[in-house]
């Protein structure tokens, strides 16, 4: 790519790759450079659990970045919006005319005693996060000689990773502080069925429990729960979510709250500076999901390439989905609404179909003839139709459960 403006993208993850690929496809003539701290080209982080099991190799999850220049192993340590420069860890200063922050997010590390090395320099041996391919390689190496694992965190990543470790032959225990697994997307009924399915795979879950320490018992490591009970383990995986990586933006004087603050054009608070992906806070929302990150990248590529200078990002309505292997689920919208909500809102209907034999759970939450939330577990045949109806706010068919089955409905 020659000529045109110099567009620097700080970060070489999923959002950065999507932006670069779309920018080129839309005819952008600028010189796009991705500065990535990792030594690897962009890849799909959502598939790391599948890399762990061997379902995919590292090359299979690579992402295209169009004709962008990739500067890998080139960590950005400082930004100067006034001079329009960035500084790399090796001391070099690079100029830019447009800057895109795609710095992503860091794993949240809970305040557990014994989590870090004695010098505080990182996680102690046997304790892992799962955010990068390097993390995945270290975890796979430990798992090869382990018999037991404890996963701290029972959200989407925790459940995915626990299932992957079980597939490698480990006995796995999940410790989750919430009332049930994946409590941001699933209700108690779906989570109970998920928990039963995990148990059949060799994964036990302790919900409503808080881990407080990783301890050396003299006979090996253990995760100690708040009540004092200890779970013996050979490795620990921390899966407590992610937090936007905003240090560079804050140090450069940009407006930051939970994430880097952007408007509907994805502009940050300095001229010619934009942000997208997991590091962003837009309309008081931090998504932390690949779907919104790619939607933001598409909008920004359309604007900066000139293909659609008026393109705006209005927010995302993104389903949550886990669809690799057994225990598939999909959830959209306000699926947590239930009977007590019906009592307070006469226009609300909650419809369910449960088949314990087949391990399927289906729930629709409707207000009038509009879908406001849904959960599918074990049978995702209707997931696409439901997600489309929810995104577009289309009226639902009458009766709505015909979307799920032709055999009628239970209410």
Image: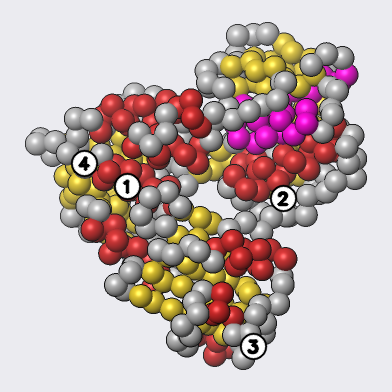
Displayed quadrant of residue 103 = top right
Q: Write down the residue under mark 3.
A: 347
Label 2, label 3: how far apart the Cα atoms are:
30 Å
Disc 1 secondary structure class: helix
Give the class, few, some or many, for how many residues have Cα within 10 Å of label 3's Cα (few <14, many ≥20). Answer: few
Q: Nearer the viewer, residue 56 or 408?
A: 408
Q: CA distance from mark 4 to mark 1?
A: 11 Å
Describe residue 406's horizontal placement relative to residue 87 as left or right. Answer: left
Separation of marks 2 and 1 at Cα, in angstroms: 32 Å
Question: Foreground residue, 347 or 150?
Answer: 347
| Furthest-front residue in this view | 406
Residue 178 in the image: state x and y as whole percent: 39, 62
Disc 4 from disc 2: Cα separation: 42 Å
Q: Nearer the viewer, residue 21 or 238?
A: 21
Q: Residue furthest left?
A: 219
Mark 2 or mark 1, whichever is nearer to me? 1
Question: On the rendered structure, is 287 left or right of 272?
Answer: left
Q: Which residues are magenta?
A: 4-25
C-alpha gap between disc 3 and disc 4:
48 Å
First in sequence: mark 2 or mark 1? 1
Q: Which mark is residue 282?
A: 2
Q: Which mark is first along the chain, 1 or 3?
A: 1
Question: Which of the numbered marks, if any, corresponds to residue 162?
Answer: 1
- Name the residue tied to disc 4: 169
Say which residue appears at 62% left-offset and 48% top-offset: 291
Can residue 179 be spotted in the picture?
Answer: no
* Mark 3: secondary structure: loop
């Amino acid at each position: 790519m020659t000529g045109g403006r110099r567009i620097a993208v700080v970060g070489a993850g999923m959002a950065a790759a999507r932006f670069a690929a779309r920018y080129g496809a839309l005819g952008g003539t600028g010189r796009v450079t991705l500065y990535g701290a990792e030594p690897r080209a962009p890849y799909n982080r959502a598939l790391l659990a599948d890399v762990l099991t061997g379902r995919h190799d590292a090359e299979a999850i690579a992402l295209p970045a169009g004709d962008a220049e990739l500067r890998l192993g080139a960590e950005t340590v400082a930004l100067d919006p006034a001079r329009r420069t960035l500084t790399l860890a090796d001391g070099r200063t690079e100029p830019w005319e447009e800057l895109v922050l795609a710095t992503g997010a860091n794993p949240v590390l809970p305040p557990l005693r014994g989590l870090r090395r004695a010098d505080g320099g990182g996680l102690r041996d046997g304790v892992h996060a799962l955010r990068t391919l390097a993390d995945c390689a270290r975890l796979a190496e430990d798992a090869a000689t382990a018999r037991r694992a404890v996963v701290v965190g029972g959200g989407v990543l925790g459940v995915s990773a626990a299932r992957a470790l079980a597939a490698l032959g480990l006995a796995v225990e999940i410790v989750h502080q919430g009332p049930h697994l994946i409590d941001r997307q699933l209700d108690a009924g779906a989570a109970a069925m998920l928990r039963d399915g995990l148990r059949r795979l060799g994964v036990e879950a302790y919900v409503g429990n808080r881990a407080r320490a990783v301890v050396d018992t003299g006979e090996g490591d253990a995760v100690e729960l708040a009540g004092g009970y200890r779970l013996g383990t050979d490795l620990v995986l921390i899966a407590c979510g992610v937090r936007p990586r905003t240090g560079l933006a804050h140090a450069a004087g940009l407006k930051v709250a939970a994430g880097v603050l952007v408007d509907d054009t994805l502009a940050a608070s300095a001229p010619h500076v934009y942000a997208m992906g997991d590091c962003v806070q837009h309309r008081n929302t931090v998504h932390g999901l690949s779907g919104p990150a790619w939607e933001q990248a598409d909008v920004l590529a359309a604007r900066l390439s000139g293909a659609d200078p008026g393109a705006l990002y209005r927010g995302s309505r993104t389903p949550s989905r886990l669809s690799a292997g057994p225990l598939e689920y999909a959830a959209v919208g306000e699926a947590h609404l239930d009977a007590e909500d019906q009592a307070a809102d006469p226009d609300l209907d909650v419809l369910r179909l449960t088949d314990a034999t087949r391990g399927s759970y289906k729930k629709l939450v409707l207000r009038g003839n509009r879908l406001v939330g849904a959960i599918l577990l074990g049978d995702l045949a209707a997931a696409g139709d439901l997600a489309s109806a929810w995104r577009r706010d289309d009226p639902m068919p009458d009766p709505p459960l015909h979307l799920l089955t032709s055999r009628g409905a239970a209410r």
